[in-house]
Amino acid sequence: MRNQLSIVCRVLVMGFFCGALVSCADDAPKPKLPSAFPVKAATNAETVSAPTAAATTAISSANSNAIAATKPAAIPSVDPLTSSATSNPSLIELPSITLPKPAAIPSVDPLTSSATSNPSLIELPSITLPKPAAWMWVKPSMQFRTLQYQVCAQASGKGAPCADLIVSVFKLGDGGSVDANIERWKNQFQNTDGSPAQPTRSQRVVAGVSVTRVDVKGAWKGMGMSQAQNNSEQLAAVIELPKETIYIRVVGPESIVEGARKDFEAMVDGLAPRTPLAK
């Protein structure tokens, strides 16, 4: 019995001592362990120290200076052997050859009438025709007009209405057929009742060349005109050459066109080919 009480007392004493040790361990301050990763990650700029940033700036500046030192002052935009705005104006210069440059390049065919040509002739590369000097050359006002002249009444003053003499040259196969063009002219003229005017048509040979004459009268509404012009007339001649067709017509107020009829007929009768026609 005494031995059993002794064992119990030893167990109680050892339990008390162990509890006291655990309590002391809990009350002791615990060391703060370092975090594995910072709460806020530093940016690249924040992690670079001042001396390192200064060194980087110095290296960048040195590189820029080196690049600037090796860059040429100017790079020519064109080959120096090719003509430019400051080159010799009398030469066309290329790296491989040079060519003499003409003083002036004509803007129109020299065989075609211009403002400075003989005022008594209509000149084309293939033919010439006589005309009154009073029929004044003007710049063609529309496409497909090779030449254009103003035909005015002799007594007309400044600003008075005039007729137009129009010359159109088409290479063979261009510009439509003769019949198609005459039909188009017919549809541009109307009688007083609104019906299409009927043209008068004839054909003859002049200087070995086939010429078709067409006359038409009425209210005229040509290409690009907003409204018809009453009491108008057109005299036309279609000259058919081996390689081209030439359309010549004077169109405008009937009184002016009728006044020019005699000169128009003389112009067509005076047709002269520049070279012999091919047989």
Image (cartoon, helix red, strand yellow):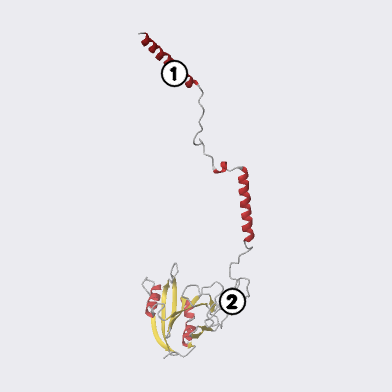
Q: Is residue 254 above or below residue 13?
A: below
**Counting residues from the N terminus, which is met first, the one under dot 1 or under dot 2?**
1
Picture coordinates of residue 141, whole percent (x, y): 50, 72
Q: What residue sits 37% from the left and 79% below the top?
A: 179
Q: What residue sits 63% from the left and 54% below the top?
A: 62
Query: Within the image, what quadrant is residue 48 found in?
Result: top right
Disc assigned to residue 179: none
Picture coordinates of residue 244, whole percent (x, y): 43, 82
Circle 2 is placed at which residue position? 92
Secondary element type, mark 1:
helix
User: What amino acid type is highlighted by mark number 2?
Assistant: Ile
**Left/right of residue 85 with respect to residue 145 in the rendered view:** right
Disc assigned to residue 18: 1
| Residue nearest the viewer, comparing 151 with 39 | 39
Distance of mark 1 from mark 2, alpha carbons?
Answer: 114 Å
| Residue nearest the viewer, comparing 45 with 7 | 7
Q: Residues within 10 Å of mark 2 (few under 14, many from 20)?
A: some
Q: What residue sits 42% from the left and 89% below the top?
A: 205
**Quadrant placement of the C terminus:** bottom left
Q: Can residue 213 be seen in this snapshot?
A: yes
**Quadrant placement of the N terminus:** top left
User: What amino acid type is highlighted by mark number 1?
Assistant: Cys
Picture coordinates of residue 242, whole percent (x, y): 42, 86
Picture coordinates of residue 60, whole percent (x, y): 61, 52
Q: Nearer the viewer, mark 1 or mark 2?
A: 1
Q: Can residue 190 be seen in this snapshot?
A: no
